Image (cartoon, helix red, strand yellow):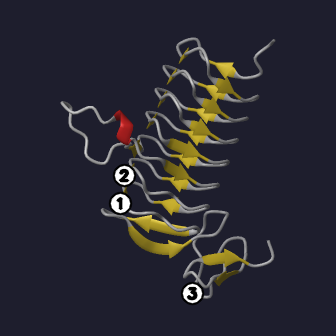
Amino acid sequence: MKNDFFVHDTAIIDPGCKIGNGTRIWHWCHIMKGVTIGKHCNIGENAFIETGVKLGNYVKVKNNVALYTGIICEDNVFLGPNCVFTNVANPRSFIERKNEFKETIIHEGATIGANATIVCGHDIGKYSFVGAGSVVTRTVPDYTMVVGNPARFYAYVCKCGCKLNKNLKCVSCGQQYTAAETDEIIPINV
């Protein structure tokens, strides 16, 4: 059976991975056994993806990103260059904590900016946006932009990635949102 994905000659793909059609894996990447990568993903140079990681379709992993066991990316997620993920809350080199790995889900359409750090166990909401260099220490709600260290609410954002105005309307595409009962926002007529 012919592979319908591209792997650069310098990349290492361990046996037992599932890689979708149209995916591209670039220079000096290492994909460990048991990884699932969806269709039409782009894995940038020097990425490391550990056993058990799951990437949906159309995920972009930019250069120098390491994804550890417990990370799940849904469809259309963007991981900026050098962003960092953890999977143990209190690591020590002399204590084995592999049974304490925490799951972190990056939901559909979310963006993680360059050099951001995501502390394990805190999900990133759908179509949310984590600003470059931010340190996420709690769950990020859907359609929310967070920035800083620790990351705090900065603005609501549209599915297209642009900020919403005070009336919860996108300044770029015009999509209107409304406040839900849960203090989150949702798009109208999508």
Q: Residues within 10 Å of mark 3 (few under 14, many from 20)?
A: few
Residue 170 appears in view:
no
Chain-order first, disc 3 or disc 2? 2
Q: Give the percent coordinates (x, y) of residue 85.
A: 40, 44
Q: Secondary structure at mark 3?
A: loop
**188 sits left or right of 127 in the view:** right
Identify residue type, mark 1: Thr
Q: Give the percent coordinates (x, y) of residue 30.
A: 49, 21
Identify residue type, mark 2: Val
Residue 137 or 11: which is nearer the viewer? 137
Q: Give the percent coordinates (x, y) of residue 39.
A: 73, 35
Q: Which residue is mark 2?
A: 119
Q: CA distance from mark 2 to mark 1?
A: 6 Å
- Rendered-image quadrant of the N terminus: top right
The answer to whether residue 167 is above or below residue 118 is below
Chain-order first, disc 2 or disc 1? 2
Identify residue type, mark 3: Lys
Q: Residue 137's mark?
A: 1
Residue at 43% over, 73% down: 153
Residue 38 or 23: which is nearer the viewer? 38
Q: Secondary structure at mark 1?
A: loop
**64 sits left or right of 175 in the view:** left
Q: Residue 177's mark?
A: none
Residue 181 or 156: which is nearer the viewer? 181
Q: Residues within 10 Å of mark 2 (few under 14, many from 20)?
A: many
Q: Are marks 3 and 1 in contact (CB under 8 Å)?
A: no
Q: CA distance from mark 3 to mark 2?
A: 30 Å
Q: Are marks 2 and 1 in contact (CB under 8 Å)?
A: yes
Q: CA distance from mark 3 to mark 1?
A: 26 Å
The answer to whether residue 28 is above or below residue 119 is above
Q: Which residue is mark 3?
A: 166
**7 sits left or right of 120 in the view:** right
